[in-house]
Amino acid sequence: MAFDDYEDAAVDPATAEPTGHPRTMVRVCEVPGGRELWNAHLGPSVLYCLGFSRDGGTLALGDRGGDLEMRAVDGGSRLWQTKVPSSPVFRLAFSPDGRTLAGADRSIVRMWDLGDGREILILRGAPPRPFDGGYNPQLSWSPDGGLLASLNWDGSISIWNGSETSVEPADRRAAALGRVFAWHLDEAEAAVAGDQADAASFHFNLLRGREPPDSSSLRRRGQLAIQLGDAKSSRADFDRWLAGGEPDQGGAWPWCARAYLIGGDRPAFRWLCTRLLDAVEKDPHDSEVLSAAHTLGLAPCPPAEADRLIRLVKPERLSNVRHPHLLSASPWLCSARGDGSGP
């Protein structure tokens, strides 16, 4: 077993003040009987992490000052030492094949070659931390070394391919561009939520002319565009989003409808409402029904559409304040039916 230990600094007998820094040590002992095999002084910094390799032959240690070193379990000699920039490592994980060491700080995961300590990879599973709140990094390899999993500061979990399968440079670049696109989306959405119009526009403008990596990113960019007053760009993105098949993000339908209405295209809006009602009738979940009510409630709808929606809605939902979209839509539905009495 290995553990950290600390020696107090020497004290001036006259003033009772420390004359130096406490010294950090690592001690390695046999488990049966507790006999100490060796100890080593590491300097004044507190030890944050340590761990044995899978074969028990090496011991990795990382301290608060950012020093990371590897020692031989047999005798304690230092095999290599490196400085980790920006942030100390909190968790260490040896790959099952004994060739790689992974370490997690409070923002990213780094990987080193066990042979000489070269840093060979940096992995980021979440956007940059906006503040330094409480968070305990966790890191683990799968038993076969094929996957590496880490817990991120924002509560998400990232799983990376840990194999050495070659990836073509073009594929690596495409994946990187996809991550850049997602990062700008996240930052723009956060700026909109924080009422920071300039920041939102900055990130949104960097997304113009770029190809979204997937349909979800295309839909999110269209939603951002309508929030920032760019109905033309929003319309273009939502047209592509709808052309890609039957969307499954029900909450996006009202944003698409807004793009058509703001652009003055009432026929497209009516077509969208019909398509939405067709989809909801196939699978009338509460969330989809609410999305349909929200969408149809953006503008007066024909009696036929109102009747179709009313058939999908249980009467008690319209009087339930937990469903404001249905309540906001009900005047249009009443007007469309022409009786003023409500459904």
Image (tube, rainbow, N blue to C red):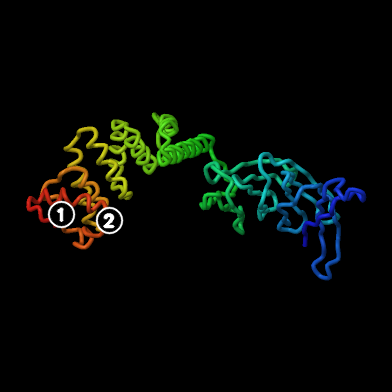
Q: According to the image, label 2 marks what residue?
A: 323
Q: According to the image, label 1 marks what residue?
A: 308
Q: Place residue 307 in its image quadrant.
A: bottom left
x, y (%) of residue 246?
28, 48
Above or below: residue 190 compared with residue 6: above
Work out which quarter of the rendered image holds the N terminus and state it: bottom right
Q: Place residue 202 in its image quadrant.
A: top left
Q: CA distance from mark 2 to mark 1?
A: 18 Å
In this view of the protein, which residue sits in the foreground, 176 or 311?
A: 311
Residue 26 marker: none
- Residue type pointed to by label 1: Arg
Q: Place residue 231 in its image quadrant.
A: top left
Q: Residue furthest bottom?
A: 33
In the figure, is residue 212 to the left or right of 334? right
x, y (%) of residue 211?
40, 34
- Residue type pointed to by label 2: His
Q: Residue furthest left?
A: 339
* Residue 286, visible in the rendered structure: yes
